[in-house]
Image (cartoon, rainbow, N blue to C red):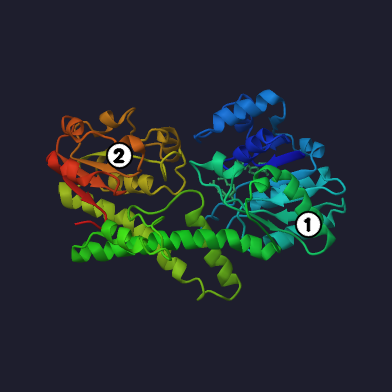
Amino acid sequence: MRISVIGCGYLGAVHAACMAELGHDVVGIDVDEHRVAELSAGRAPFFEPGLPDVLSRALATGRLRFTTDMAAAAEATVHFVAVGTPQTKGSFNADLTYVDAAVQGLLPYLGEGDLVVGKSTVPVGTAARLAGVVEGAGAGATLAWNPEFLREGFAVRDTVAPDRFVYGVPQGDAGERATAVLDEVYATALATGTPRIVTDYATAELVKVSANAFLATKISFINAMAEIAEATGADVTQLADAIGHDARIGRRFLNAGLGFGGGCLPKDIRAFRARADELGLADTLSFLGEVDAINLRRRERVVTLTRELVGDLEGATIGVLGLAFKPDSDDVRDSPALDVVKKLVEAGANVTAYDPEANETATRSLPSLVTAGSAADAVRGADAVLVLTEWREFRDLVPAEVKALVSRAVVVDGRNCLDADAWRAEGFVLRGLGRP
Ligand code: NAD
């Protein structure tokens, strides 16, 4: 099929490359010239495992190209909209400026029978409104909403072989045609039995935000238990193991720690609440405010814990390991680690941070940040070492080697990812979250 992908960020670049890898002819369109130049040269503009390989293979076939020229969409019949929907400054609402601009920009290039497919995460009601815009243009095109569930760090795998597809389509013949087109786009994954749910626009939009609300709630639930554990001397990791054996609960996403961040969960739960307010259902989703608050309190807790261990933070030397919001990503959007660094610096600490992939993105977001080129350089002379993103490199650190570098043998394990016994055996004072 001939496909255009509007917006080539964490979602769109991966989607474009993977669709070409699956045999489709794809043009990726983005307003960011630098991003388009990088992608065209086969370089991933952000860190995502496996993406550089897929990109170079797909570019070599001639089935993939990138451009800033929206007119290139005229070659395609299926148009994925994958632009950002960040939190609006000063409110919890999703900023739909980019989605609206992308759809408007696409209208002159739509032809009879074309399908516009929204992938961005949007407030419920957006698709119905945009369907009016697309149909109103009179070109004979239809809109579908096909939310994306990929996880950064596993984006290639999740795009090629997702857990499920959700198609939000209009009723009647147009919906059947849209379903048939999407089935052709995703034929490879569907052939292996990937479930697909065909539904209306509102349900499709809500599937995405409710999935994220559920995941955020699960994480904040265990972090609330961590707060209780801290007050009572219990161990939240053993608690999670024990309740996780109940198949109705499950162990995944029950890791207490510094909490969630990134370009999706925080802004999505806030936008969901804001949308519920608009619908007159503020009470229904008010619990998401608590989910958010629990999550943000964990960041403060790491700072408090560090203060307890080193005394005054003013002038203390802190080595921070991890800046990305999660391992295997360089994404620092709403990163809990970066937030902790900011709070430590505000308290007067001298922070040197290292992340295997996110030093650059973090420095762009916080230009005063002092980064090191290695974990060893970050912890040298430190009064405390803080592990804030659970990269394998940090889990594999050898306590004796770290001890030879630091000024004081103090570790705060913000992700409960270290072998506490091994570190303590080496003489470290180690504190995790929700653990005695
Ligand atoms: P991003 O900021 O990485 O990428 C957005 C891209 O869109 C940028 O490259 C930007 O230059 C481009 N863009 C903006 N306006 C444009 C326009 N008018 N025309 C063409 N390009 C334009 O964002 P992202 O993380 O890829 O997220 C995109 C959407 O996907 C969001 O709604 C997000 O919630 C959703 N989503 C993201 C993920 C994820 O893991 N990142 C997962 C699922 C869903």
Could you tell me how far apart the alpha carbons at marks 2 and 1 are, in whole angstroms? 50 Å
Q: Is residue 281 left or right of residue 116?
A: left
Name the spot of residue 325 as percent of width and height, x first.
42, 45
Residue drawn at the location 28% of the way across and 32% of the way down: 378
User: Identity of the amino acid at label 2?
Assistant: Arg
Q: Which residue is mark 2?
A: 395
Q: Which residue is mark 1?
A: 133
Q: Is residue 120 left or right of residue 216?
A: right
Numbered circle sitting on residue 319: none
Name the spot of residue 370 as percent of width and height, x first.
33, 34
Q: Quadrant of residue 58?
A: top right
Binning the other alpha carbons within 10 Å of mark 2 as few (below 14), some (14 to 19) or many (20 upward) gives some
Name the spot of residue 425 as percent of width and height, x first.
13, 41
Q: Is residue 369 visible?
A: no
Q: Nearer the viewer, mark 2 or mark 1?
A: 2
Q: Residue furthest front?
A: 192
Residue drawn at the location 44% of the way across and 40% of the way down: 365
